[in-house]
Image (cartoon, coloured by chain):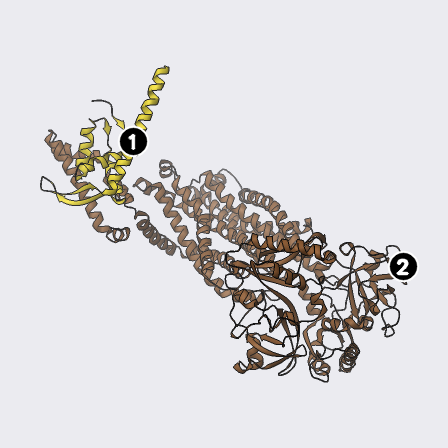
Chain colours: A yellow, B brown
Amino acid sequence: MPPKSDLPQGTLDLLILKIAALGPVHGYAIAQRLQQVSRDVVQVPQGSLYPALHRLENRGLLAADWKDTETGREAKFYRLTRKGRAQLESESASWQRLTQAVTAILKLAGANE
Amino acid sequence: MNWLSRLFRGSALEDRLDKELRHHVEQHTADLIARGLSPEEARRQARLAIGGPEQVKESCRDARGTRWLTDFAQDFRYAVRTLRQKPAFAAVTLLTLALGAGATTVMFTVINGVLLKPLPYAHPEALVNIQERTDWSTQFGNIWGLTYPNFLDCKAGAPSLDMAALHYGGGIVSSPGAAEYVESFKVSAGLFATLGVPLFRGREFLPEDDGPGAPPVAIISHDFWERRFAGNPSALGSTLVYDGIPRTIVGIAPPDFRIDTDTFDIYTPIGQDASPILHNRNAHGIGGWARLRPGATLAQANAELAAVGVHLAEQFPASNKGRTFFAAPLRPDVGDVRSTLWLLLAAVSAVLLIACANIASLLLARAVSRERELAMRVALGAGRARLARQCLTESFVLGLAGSALGVVLAALGLRPFITFWPGDLPRASEVRFDWHVLLFALAVSIASSFLFGLAPALRAAARDLEQTLRAGARSIAGASRRLHAAFVITEIALAVVLLVCAGMLGRTLVRLASLDPGVNTHNLLIARTAISPALANPARIRAAWNEILDRARAVPGVEAIAIVDTVPMRQGDNRVPYSTTAATNPDNRQPLVLANSVTPDYLKVTGIPLRRGRFLTEQDRLGTQPVIVIDEVLAQQAFPGQDPIGKPIWVRVDLNGTNDPATIVGIVGHVRQWGLAGDDAAPVRAQAYYAFAQVPDRNVRRWSELSSIAVRTGVDPLTLVESLRHEIRGASNDQVLYQVRTMEQLAAATLARQRFLLLVFAVFAGLALLLASIGIYGVLAYLTSRRVPEIGVRIALGATSAEVMRLILRQSLGMIAIGVLAGLSAALAAARILQRLVEGMRPPDPSTFLAMIAVLVLAALLASYIPARRASRVDALTALRQD
């Protein structure tokens, strides 16, 4: 198991939005999927998942409905709103730019070594 | 779902949150069981993974966005509850705050009405005042009132301005009804339209009214209409005899219409006035008000006025060289009331600050004793920011309640305060409670809540949890002791400032009141006297005056009577240039003298001492040699080291109608013309007296309009007013007395401002002293009570009660000393401001400072004595067992 790293500030919101973009999903599933997709590299503190979900809902980026799960239990399903989709697009674009820039700088430093 | 519905559906939300989290844990547990863990172990791990459920819930609630509001409501209720649990504490703090906030609110309400509110005209921001400026200065500066010819040229040359001229005047209304002196304004046609004020009835002056030879018309005030015409609409179009001329009333001004800050009874068209003074390019003093036309800017108007100035300087170099015109926003002219008001607001703010420091130290003491409670709550999951917020909410509740109470006090105290104002407070009718004032009160409450709530709140947020829980109640961290000391020091410093100010004002008043005014103020009546406006012939005017003197002399109780044009200590300006050689200097460099025309009995009436030579006599009349009597100041100033008697002096009063010099025949004592307080620093103090009988014929009418009678009486002067009024009425029953005062009243009025300031400052200083003493007592009592175990140890180890007492007093003395030192420098600065703003103040003197500081230190030590004494009587055994 590779060592886990903490999520950089603000990226949890971005990841949540991305997962919700794939279709309505409840909190536990989000946590699961985050862990699976990131192959256990990203440590999602479950304690901060729900405050983040509530915050995104409050900002109108996510909407929530209570629906039955496949196991027949009622759960709160989050889905992306139009505003959330726009936010996701702009945030992921800026994330791309940021990582590219950081990578470029790191390469530069490597050449100097 | 908006935040409001979220707020009201709070409990439903709580259920859902609970359900959501439970669902998560159950799912996780199920997954872990599926991976092969035992159910107990799975449940344990799932719970661990999500962390403390209450903390997660708290964070979710925070994310909801209505959190602050629910918290606030909760904290608010909690704060009210805590306050009600300690009614004594609540009462003391609320009362302290209410006094401070109430006084501050009263001051702001007055400032708002008098200084901040624009003049009550339509769109006041577009109104400007036009004045003249010269590129040279006299001792009165380089800003002048307009002359009427200059006004007319400015009006023609500045198309971006809609201009109107105003000129203050006054005269007798002799019909209909009893003769009465009224104050009036001569105004241009269109003034009311310029101001955007519609008339109550009728019309305003038209351009055709506003020229020489037009049929005489007048506009009357609403008050005059009700007073003289009983509000009868038929007044419009009827005839009124004002200033000896029958005029048709064409309009009635709206109720409470003011020119600047005052009301006037009669308005007449300025262009109808044929008096030469109005058509002289050297006779300044005409007001010019204007409204910027739509789209025009002030800069544009000023450029146009400057162009007029250049043009007139070329055309009339004698009068207009170096002279230009400018427009500035029209503001109320409230004189020295402005500085008085700001002074009082500063003083009252100091009291409020002391009140805040007092409350802060009380709250801090409470916060310290609640330390363990707070630490416990942190341990149970409360965020530190949350606790700080709760502390602030408590302060805010206090602040709001205190201010609300303060507003009530202010509402009760506002009218008495205005009535109490020395003389008339300008624009008093504008002083009202409005939303500006309420906003101010709210701002004061919030600001003061922060002031006194911040220290306890920060403390609540920054405690070291573990240490606090472990430590007993007996410990006080050094930081808290220092904070308490800081509050005491602040209070003492502020109290020093107020005490020193009050002390300086008190000394000033004592000194000023003991000054010799130069006249015998006892039993001396002064009244402006208007002779019949119908009299135009100089000989008949002189005869009318003589008859007034003769008839008044016959009134029982009158000992002597004289005519005087400028009465001491009543606002009146009679400075004219003088010279001791025939060669004259340019106007602006010639020395000035206050020249007063009087009748020979003036000396006898006023009690001014004759130093040398003789005073004016009945023999000094038209045709005889022009003579003048000067005062000691002029003698000293113009003839240092010489005998002035018999010397010539050129005073620009045209005695006998010539420019010949007058011969000095006598020297009299100096009179404090500018008031007890103001005379020493007045720019022109030298005085001269000449005979009313030598005033040339062409000036007799004008001088008569300015003159007063001065009456020396053997009885209370005010009891003679009615008989005097009756005697001087004259054959046509239209001669009146107005502005009737005793000399004592006039002299007292010149000190009214100082007296008023002293009283207010004394009250504030007393309040500050009381609050600071309470503060010292409170802090010391608190600090000492926390040191009881320590003191117990000291006593157990052999300290005597005197030593313990010294220990406590030394602590208090340290705070007092630092406070006094800090206050001294502030007091010096305040004293300098007072000296600049208040007439007759002397530079700060050490004795006042010492006396006031002694008072303060005494009070502070007295306040410290009680806790110190209590500490010295601590019983070692009980103390050691405590906690």
Q: Position of residue A4 (x, y in %)?
A: 25, 25
Parent chain of label 1: A
Q: Residue B670 sits in which quadrant?
A: bottom right
Marks 1 and 2 on same chain? no
Q: Residue B663 sits in which quadrant?
A: bottom right
Which quarter of the image is occupied by the C terminus of chain B? top left
Tag 2: residue type?
Answer: Asp
Residue A10's place in the image compared with B864, above or below, is above
Q: How many marks?
A: 2
- Residue drawn at x 22%, y 43% as measured from the top left: A81
Choose between B504 and B741: the one closer to the eye: B741
Tag shown at residue B643: 2
Which of label 1 and label 2 is nearer to you? 1
**Residue B22 visible, this orientation:** yes
Tag 1: residue type?
Answer: Trp
Q: Secondary structure at mark 2?
A: loop
Parent chain of label 2: B
Disc 1: which residue: A95
Crowding at label 2, few (<14), some or many (≥20) Cα neighbours within 10 Å? few
Crowding at label 1, few (<14), some or many (≥20) Cα neighbours within 10 Å? some
Q: Position of residue B551 (x, y in %)?
A: 77, 82
Choose between B883 and B798: the one closer to the eye: B883
Q: Is residue B787 left or right of residue B54?
A: right
Residue B154's place in the image compared with B25, above or below, is below
